[in-house]
Amino acid sequence: MSENSDTSTSLNILSSLRETLNIFEVEDYFHRAVRELSMEEPTQDECSKYYFWYLLKQIIDNESIAINYAYEIYQVVREEFVSEELNVWYEISEMIDDYRYGDNVEGITRESLITTIVKEAEKQLNCNFLLN
């Protein structure tokens, strides 16, 4: 928004915040920026869809974080979406659990797990069914 000359004091503060963040401070500046810019806050559904898209994109951009982000995707899907197309994230989370904690009878390797996750992320980014 700042690049598009949409600016406000709270938006400038919000965009300059760095880790570690205080969630209450972030939310406060977010709500202030929305009011200052006369915007409408996104719905929970819109936020969830964007976060899902963001996680998929991160997996594609950096495969080394694929396992952690895939598990995060599963948590978002479980809490926010009901879709047959997204059931695969449950299966992937089970693979992650087997690889990390289980007896791993399937012999899942880190490489095979990452390959599976990246392929699914690419597939879902290409079909864009959640962002419609």
Image: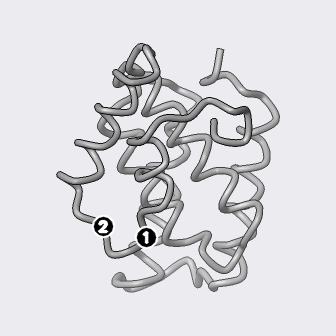
Q: In the rendering, at what x and y percent does residue 106 appear? A: 56, 77
Residue drawn at x 59%, y 30% is: 85
Residue 82 lies left or right of residue 109; in this view the side is left
Q: In the rendering, at what x and y percent does residue 108 appear? A: 59, 80
Could you classify mark 1 by the number of other residues whose Cα lies within 10 Å: few (under 14), some (14-19), or many (20 or more)? few
Residue 95 lies left or right of residue 111; in this view the side is left
Quarter holding the N terminus?
top right
**Secondary structure category for the residue under label 2:** loop
Q: Nearer the viewer, residue 74 or 4?
A: 4
Give the residue pinned by disc 2: 21
Q: In the rendering, at what x and y percent does residue 117 appear? A: 66, 61
Residue 26 lies left or right of residue 128; in this view the side is left
**Secondary structure category for the residue under label 1:** loop
**Is the residue 45 above or below the residue 97 in the image?**
above
Residue 37 lies left or right of residue 1; in this view the side is left
Residue drawn at x 23%, y 42% is: 28
Q: Nearer the viewer, residue 108 or 29?
A: 29
Separation of residues labelled 2 and 1 (CA atoms):
6 Å
Disc ID at residue 18: 1
Residue drawn at x 41%, y 84% is: 100
Could you classify mark 2 by the number of other residues whose Cα lies within 10 Å: few (under 14), some (14-19), or many (20 or more)? few
Q: Amino acid at mark 2?
A: Leu
Q: Amino acid at mark 1?
A: Arg
**Is the residue 39 above or below the residue 105 in the image?**
above
Quarter holding the C terminus?
top right
Tags 2 and 1 touching, CB below 8 Å: yes
Q: In the rendering, at what x and y percent does residue 81 appear? A: 40, 28
- Identify the image quadrant of residue 64: bottom right
Residue drawn at x 55%, y 44% is: 88
Disc ID at residue 77: none
**Is the residue 28 above or below the residue 21 in the image?**
above
